[in-house]
Amino acid sequence: MARAGEAPNVPPYWITDCVGRMQLSLPSKADVAAVFPKELIRELDVNRQNWDYHDPNGFSDGTPVYRSHSAYAGALLISLPMNDAERLKALDNAGTLKKHGQAYHKKHRRPFVALPLNEREGLAWRSDNYHTAILRAGDSLAYWSAVDRPGVDLSVERERNFQRLLSGLRARPPMTVPSESGVCLPYAFIRDDDGEVFRRIAMTYRLQQHPDVTIFLEDRTAEHIEPSTQRRPETYTPSYKLNDFWAPFGRDGGSYRSVWFPPGRNINLAGYEGKAAFVEFTHPDGSVDYGYTVAVRGDPDSKEDKPDLFLYVLRHAALAKAKGIEPVSKETLLKMAETIAVSVKRRSVVQ
């Protein structure tokens, strides 16, 4: 048992999962958010009428989440497990998308190449400035797209990353942690041997025994600093990112305040220095909840991978009360959150 001021110990019965190149431990079984099957089907539908943006991620019971996302050498969507009908519809839409692309490129005399998948289920193609692939990983589908930056030919890099995805993507049941080098995704894993590939993996969990508690961890390649004329330098700092996360809680009649004074505390997360905040937030209806957040600023110029990290542990008491479950207390949430933070580390790899 940790004494006051000491980091808590992670109980041996906690369950471990992985996010990107990191891992974390949770106190009990948890649901994992990913892209809703209907949203992936919609994303692949070239004939869809509704193009409004909304976050496509959520849990299998239909509850949406608003920060989960994936990127790996390009944009990447990973679906929740699909049934056969959903998967066939998604692949049918992908086939139509491919045909439209082929017709467009032929009309404009641009290259279009269908790519072999080595007996994998899915579709893939490329043109002069992009690659697209829809690949099956267990019961989920992955939709990957890599596009050149304006004026920069990345065709060799794109092809290399496509081959890496083609050979390395596989299913990964939740709460299993591979020992190989690579990147963990919801319900999937990409085996690779190159830690320099750009990644931005953010996964959201909901504890099954405590549905009021959601946990989020983002592991991303450290952002390169843009010129100050394009982005203010302070926006890269952990303090700014914490404030930016909490600011929306003060809109539409809500409010928030730090439980701690001073508000932010220095913290070590996965071996990197960052800032932590513990916050009380009030909903527009007057109900009160709590949240714990940690932000780490990585180093884009380091020879070793030093990523940007963001962790939150939030309580929404109404979600537990709706199921007749007693919400966790403020004290329990903080202890749980600090223990989760201690558990976050770079995933061990067996060479």
Image (cartoon, rainbow, N blue to C red):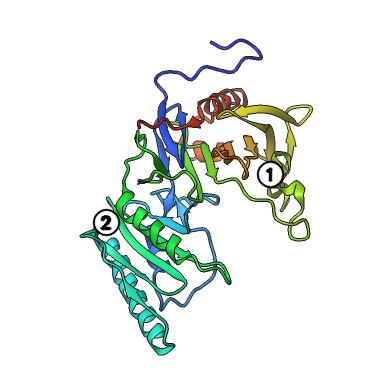
Q: Which residue is mark 2?
A: 83
Q: Give how far across and how far down residue 240 sits, in percent.
A: 73, 44
Task: Tell me if 218 is positioned left or right of 194 in this view.
Answer: right
Task: Tell me if 283 is positioned left or right of 342 in this view.
Answer: right
Residue visible at 38% across and 45% down?
A: 192
Residue visible at 36% across and 54% down?
A: 165
Q: Amino acid at mark 2?
A: Asn
Q: Tag 2 or tag 1, which sits nearer the N-term?
A: 2
* One can see residue 208 in this view: no
Residue visible at 48% across and 32% down?
A: 346
Where is 149 relative to 209, above or below? below
Where is 60 relative to 342, above or below? below
What is the C-alpha distance between the residues marked 1 and 2? 38 Å
* One can see residue 30 in this view: yes
Q: Amino acid at mark 1?
A: Lys
Residue 298 is marked as none
Residue visible at 60% across and 45% down?
A: 222
> Going by the picture, which residue comes out furthest to the bottom?
107
- Bin the neighbour count of mark 2 within 10 Å (Cα to Cα): few under 14, some 14-19, many 20 and up: few
Query: Residue 293 lies in what quarter of the image?
Result: top right
Q: Give how far across and how far down residue 194 sits, in percent.
A: 43, 45
Q: Give how far across and how far down residue 325 sits, in percent.
A: 47, 32
Query: Residue 157 lies in what quarter of the image?
Result: bottom left
- Element assignment for label 2: loop
Q: Nearer the viewer, residue 216 or 227?
A: 227
Task: Tell me if 235 is positioned left or right of 298 in this view.
Answer: right
> Going by the picture, which residue comes out furthest to the left?
119
Disc 1 versus disc 2: nearer the observer: 1
- Element assignment for label 1: helix
- Bin the neighbour count of mark 1 within 10 Å (Cα to Cα): few under 14, some 14-19, many 20 and up: many
Q: Which residue is mark 1?
A: 241
Q: Nearer the viewer, residue 304 or 79?
A: 304
